[in-house]
């Protein structure tokens, strides 16, 4: 039997524990796995693109555990009453090849993305950062705000979105969460006085969500919306002024903001900072940029976190996913009519 966390149980677990608390607790898990980055098999996500979106597999493994996530990205879905992004994931035992956990990952990915952004900010942003600008008020917005409050002590959120309904939604949720939200009139207005900036838009195009003049010395930028070839959010001039940090460089060169720069433009993989090999921010006036496209190791960590937290609780059920004949070499016995015939005689 395989442990299974469906949408209902994921919702109940997050509601019981609190999204902010779970994001806070997930950050040390991420830091532990980033610190042992060289132990993992690493490959850029496997993507199947269509005119309307993308479907991807994101696999990775260490010596003991294998994980993958199935995820889509379809920007036109909301117009049809569907989510832009949905996902599920599997954790498996390397020694036997048997899956041990299957989980929904639409909600879980939001938690892990927020935790990854917050982890990056802890290592790259100024420690006195208290104002967060959110450019994009969609599905990620509340999670990002809670992650920055949990890890960085953010006190004020300044938000902007081209969709007024998205801002209306964020205002309602922010009030319930006790977030001090300022509804900006533009992206430039949102960035006014901000210490940390997170861009999280969904359009799959070469867009310029942030102009160079909006970004001031000392800011830390989390660019999390660019996650596929042909999709960016920042003016290329911002990249020239920033110290750039990425997850897995070969993947980010294809999918991230650094699509816009030369292949030899210097970047630093964030794990080296988390592991203490390299420094992150080196001065208060430095502009740091986390060009985050999402990487399979983060999903590995999130699934490991769920396994550790819900195993043996009412939030995990079981599904009969793996055929298990009494004789491991006799799979046919599970579909043969012979036992029934013998019994009839």
Image (tube, grey):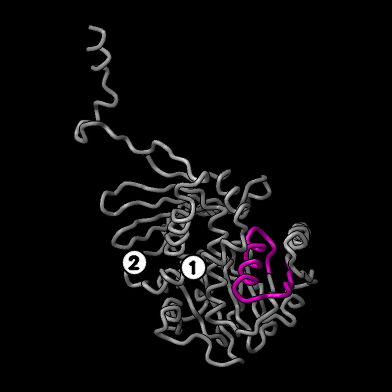
Spatial CA span between label 1 and label 2 = 21 Å
Check disc 1 and report its element: helix, strand or loop: helix
The number of callouts visible is: 2
Q: Name the residue: 29% across, 49% down.
A: 97
| Figure quadrant of the N terminus | top left
The residue to which callout 1 is attached is 255
Q: Position of residue 270 (x, y in %)?
A: 46, 77
Tell which of 28 and 183 is nearer to you.
28
The answer to if 176 sits in the magenta stretch is: no
Residues marked 1 and 2 touching at CB (< 8 Å): no
Q: Where is residue 130 in the image (x, y as percent from the top left)?
A: 68, 79
Q: Name, please, the residue furthest toward the top.
A: 345
Q: Name the residue: 58% across, 82% down.
A: 125
Q: Position of residue 343 (x, y in %)?
A: 25, 11
Which residues are drawn in magenta? Answer: 135-160
Residue 326's image quarter?
A: top left
The residue to which callout 2 is attached is 40
Q: Name the residue: 63% across, 52% down.
A: 15
Q: Is residue 180 above or below residue 48?
A: below
Closer to viewer: mark 1 or mark 2: 2
Would residue 336 be found to the left or right of residue 221 on screen? left
Instruction: Count neighbours of disc 1 (C-alpha within 10 A) and say few if under 14, some if 14 to 19, many if 20 or more.
Output: many
| Figure quadrant of the C terminus | top left
Query: Which disc number belongs to residue 29?
Result: none
Check disc 2 and report its element: helix, strand or loop: loop
Instruction: Count neighbours of disc 2 (C-alpha within 10 A) and say few if under 14, some if 14 to 19, many if 20 or more.
Output: some
Q: In this view, does 221 lie above or below 317?
A: below
Q: Reading the chain from its start, which is encountered first: label 1 or label 2? A: 2
Residue 341's image quarter?
A: top left
Q: Name the residue: 66% across, 50% down.
A: 78
């Amino acid at each position: 039997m395989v442990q299974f966390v469906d949408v209902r149980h994921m919702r109940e677990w997050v509601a019981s524990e609190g999204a902010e608390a779970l994001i806070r607790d997930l950050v040390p898990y991420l830091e532990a796995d980033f610190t042992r980055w060289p132990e993992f098999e690493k490959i850029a996500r496997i993507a199947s693109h269509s005119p309307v979106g993308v479907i991807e597999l994101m696999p990775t493994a260490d010596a003991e555990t294998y994980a993958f996530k199935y995820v889509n990205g379809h920007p036109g879905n909301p117009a049809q009453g569907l989510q832009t992004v949905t996902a599920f994931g599997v954790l498996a035992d390397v020694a036997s090849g048997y899956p041990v956990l299957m989980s929904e990952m639409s909600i879980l990915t939001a938690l892990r993305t927020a935790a990854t952004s917050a982890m990056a900010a802890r290592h790259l942003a100024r420690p006195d950062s208290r104002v967060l600008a959110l450019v994009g008020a969609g599905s990620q917005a509340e999670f990002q705000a809670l992650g920055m409050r949990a890890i960085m002590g953010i006190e004020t959120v300044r938000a902007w979105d081209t969709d007024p309904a998205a801002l209306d939604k964020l205002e309602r949720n922010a009030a319930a969460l006790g977030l001090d939200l300022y509804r900006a009139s533009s992206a430039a207005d949102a960035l006014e006085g901000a210490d940390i900036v997170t861009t999280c838009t969904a359009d799959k195009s070469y867009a310029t969500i942030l102009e160079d003049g909006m970004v001031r010395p000392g800011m830390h930028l989390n660019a999390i919306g660019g996650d596929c070839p042909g999709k960016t959010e920042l003016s290329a001039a911002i990249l020239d002024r920033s110290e750039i940090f990425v997850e897995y460089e070969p993947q980010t060169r294809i999918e991230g903001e650094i699509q816009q720069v030369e292949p030899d433009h210097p970047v630093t993989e964030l794990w080296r900072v988390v592991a203490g090999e390299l420094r992150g921010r080196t001065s208060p006036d430095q502009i740091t940029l986390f060009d985050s496209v999402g990487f399979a190791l983060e999903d590995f960590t999130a699934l490991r976190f769920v396994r550790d937290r819900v195993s043996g609780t009412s939030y995990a059920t079981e599904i009969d996913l793996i055929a298990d004949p009494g004789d491991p070499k006799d799979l046919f016995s599970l579909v043969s009519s012979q036992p029934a015939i013998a019994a009839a005689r």
